[in-house]
Image (cartoon, rainbow, N blue to C red):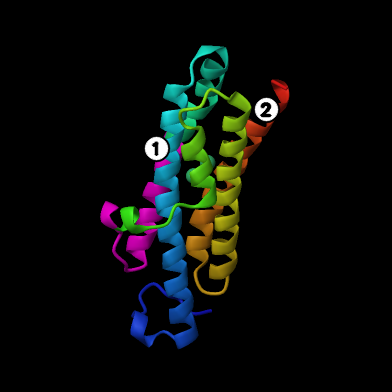
């Protein structure tokens, strides 16, 4: 296995250089996704009132901190890999993912089930992204795979919490 930390980018085999570039692009997408999720969850917990709002806030509020925590861990990893962490200018120019679009749509809505379903879609989108990052870095970057595996475990928990909440209130 090639050890990519401590080896300059140019001296890495071309195929590993390409994989590393792809990895960093996926990490940047994940970094923005985490921050955007935190913004949208914050809007959801503040804009939904009544009994269901209180119930959801109890579960979703701690997750907002966790999503920011994920963003910080990913930023650290991008930096360790020798790349710049992008500013909000890059974020503003980037495309909105399908799950984030759904979160934006329900952020001011009072439809509890539509909100839960959009949150589950966002968690599923994050899980899919992390699984592809883990499988990409398997051959050359076990440390990034490890960081992302821990984040994936949190997203699985977030998904299951929302899944149980939606079945308990059906
Ligand atoms: Fe997250
Ligand atoms: Fe999450």
- Furthest toward the top, the residue is 51
* Precedes in sequence: disc 1 or disc 2: 1
* Horizontal arrangement in the rendering, residue 115 relative to residue 83 (left or right): right
Magenta region, main secondary structure: helix
Q: Is residue 69 visible?
A: no
Q: Is residue 112 above or below residue 25?
A: above
Question: What residue would you read off at disc 2?
Answer: 166
* Horizontal arrangement in the rendering, residue 22 relative to residue 8 (left or right): right
Decide whether residue 79 is among the magenta residues: yes
Q: Which mark is residue 116?
A: none
Which secondary structure, mark 2?
helix
Question: What residue would you read off at disc 1?
Answer: 39
Q: Quadrant for residue 164, please give it.
A: top right
Q: Nearer the viewer, residue 67 or 2?
A: 67
For the record, the magenta segment spans 65-89
In x, y percent, where is residue 92? 32, 53
Q: Nearer the viewer, residue 60 or 91?
A: 91
On-image quarter of the C terminus: top right
| Whether the residue under disc 1 has CB within 8 Å of ligand 1 | no
- How much space separates mark 1 and mark 2, taking CA atoms? 22 Å
Which secondary structure, mark 1?
helix
Q: Quadrant for residue 52, please give it.
A: top right
Residue count near mark 1 (Cα–Cα under 10 Å), binned few <14, some 14–19, many ≥20: some
Q: Residue at x 46, y 39 (%)?
A: 104
């Amino acid at each position: 296995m090639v050890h990519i930390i401590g080896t300059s980018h140019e001296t890495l085999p071309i195929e590993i250089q390409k994989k590393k570039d792809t990895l960093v692009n996926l990490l940047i997408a994940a970094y923005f996704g985490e921050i955007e999720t935190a913004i949208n969850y914050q809007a959801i917990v503040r804009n939904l009132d009544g009994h269901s709002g209180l119930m959801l806030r109890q579960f979703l509020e701690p997750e907002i901190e966790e999503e920011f925590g994920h963003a910080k861990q990913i930023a650290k990893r991008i930096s360790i890999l020798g790349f710049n962490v992008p500013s909000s200018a890059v974020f503003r120019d980037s495309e909105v993912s399908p799950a984030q679009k759904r979160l934006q749509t329900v952020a001011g809505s009072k439809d509890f089930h539509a909100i839960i379903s959009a949150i589950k879609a966002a968690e599923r989108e994050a899980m899919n992204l992390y699984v592809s990052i883990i499988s990409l870095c398997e051959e050359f970057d076990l440390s990034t795979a490890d960081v992302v595996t821990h984040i994936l475990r949190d997203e699985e928990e977030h998904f299951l919490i929302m899944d149980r909440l939606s079945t308990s209130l059906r």
